[in-house]
Image: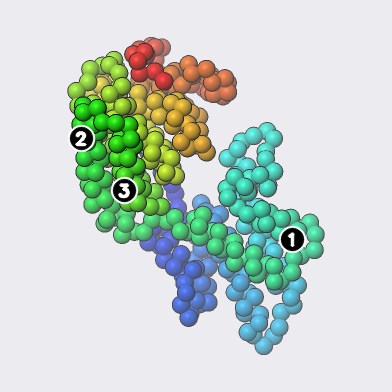
Amino acid sequence: MSRYTITPWRTQHDLLQVRAQLYSPSATITETQRLAISRIMAWKLRGNLPHAVESTALLIDAQLHHSGSTSESTSTSTFSIRAVYSAAFTRFVTGFCDIGRNRERSLEPSSMLAIARQIGMPDEFVALRHEATHEELPSLRRLVKATDEALGWLWQAYWGRLEEVEDVEVAMPEFRREAGELLKAFRRGRRDELRSGLGDKEQDDELKRLGDEVVGQCGDSAARVRAVTEALVDDALILPATREMGSSLDGAYLIWNGLLLELSERIPGFRHALLTKLLAAIGAHTTAVPAHDVRKEALSLWLLHIVLAKDFSRAETGHKPQAEVMKCCCLHPGHWSEYIGKRLLQNEDAALEEDWAELFEASLVSGTISKPPPASSRQ
């Protein structure tokens, strides 16, 4: 179930090098930016260039055009400078809003302003784009200010989120090990708490403390969030040590629910990363007979629990994973994909059933109906 992304750059280091050139504070910033823009234009010829990368190049190119016109002996008209800024800015805003509309796949797409708000783009950007397209070109002062703000927004939305090469390739194994040890210590402590009957306040304080520690270590790093989910799933920390087919996961839910909810609420994308990891583990090839694979049954129950439990739905309101999981079940048919898909379609979600029932039935590899889990594990 792995997903591969084709990029026009060879390595992550190439992209990070361009980022450093585009946002460089050095005295030779103009020359380094020109080199970065030329490289991006070459990438564009290869295809699959992210809109954020192209937009950054166009906006900075407009700035260079402006600065060059003021420093050269031959003056450039103010109108032409405004036109260059307006073209770059309009393409920047329109491209991001079009991406948002394509993701909606709706017969009645949202307005450009609504899409901009969904992706965190300031309303002023859409207003300025409308003015530049349908009215007189905005003043040079406003365009210069808006371009600076757009480059700042692009840093926050894209460039600042890129993983440093050394973090991914060198520091990540050590962080992965430390995360595993931290979560193992939590599991031991949580079991002791449940045995000793520790009060709710003490349990809440411990969850808050551990949540603070994990959130602080993950920061804004998507790679570190993935490392935490790998420790939970690959190391089987969320699975009972001994379990028989068909038995519930109530004990595991009791141990882990609080922490997983805490992390889902405080780390953007944690729930999505955890579900992605669960789907990958469920779809991985093993030598076990699928219908008797205790581990995959437990992972499937965990996935359904996180997708369907109301507490988790409230924790990450912007992420609705049912359709994503159904898509995965249709594209990767198998015993446990069939099991998960049927459970989701039985959840009385009319919209989900309308969108996915026929496609799911067509994807089934067998006519057998998977045995439902014990009633005590249903959410």
Q: Quadrant of the N terminus?
A: top left
Q: Which numbered tag is attached to residue 38?
A: none
Direction from residue 111 to residue 228 in the image, left or right: left
In the displayed structure, 41 sits above or below 176; it is below
- Amino acid type of the residue tagged 3 in the rendering: Glu
The location of residue 189, given as percent across then percent down, is 22, 36
Query: What residue does disc 2 label?
Result: 188
The location of residue 139, given as percent across then percent down, is 74, 69
Q: Residue at x 32, y 31 (%)?
A: 200
Q: Which numbered tag is attached to residue 132?
A: 1
Q: Residue at x 32, y 57 (%)?
A: 167
For marks 1 and 3, the one nearer the N-term is 1
Q: Say which element carries label 2.
A: helix
Farthest-out residue, right: 135
Q: Nearer the viewer, residue 152 or 203?
A: 203
Q: Residues within 10 Å of mark 3 (few under 14, many from 20)?
A: few
Mark 1 or mark 3, whichever is nearer to me: 3
Direction from residue 247 to residue 140 in the image, left or right: right
* Callout 1–callout 3 Cβ contact below 8 Å: no
In the displayed structure, 372 sits above or below 202; it is above
Q: Nearer the viewer, residue 324 or 152?
A: 152
The location of residue 253, given as percent across then percent down, is 32, 27
Q: Say which element carries label 1.
A: helix
- Give the total number of marks visible in the rendering: 3
Q: Nearer the viewer, residue 53 or 156?
A: 156
In the displayed structure, 16 sits above or below 27; it is above
For marks 2 and 1, the one nearer the N-term is 1
Q: Which numbered tag is attached to residue 213?
A: 3
Mark 2 or mark 1, whichever is nearer to me: 2
Q: Quadrant of the C terminus?
A: top left
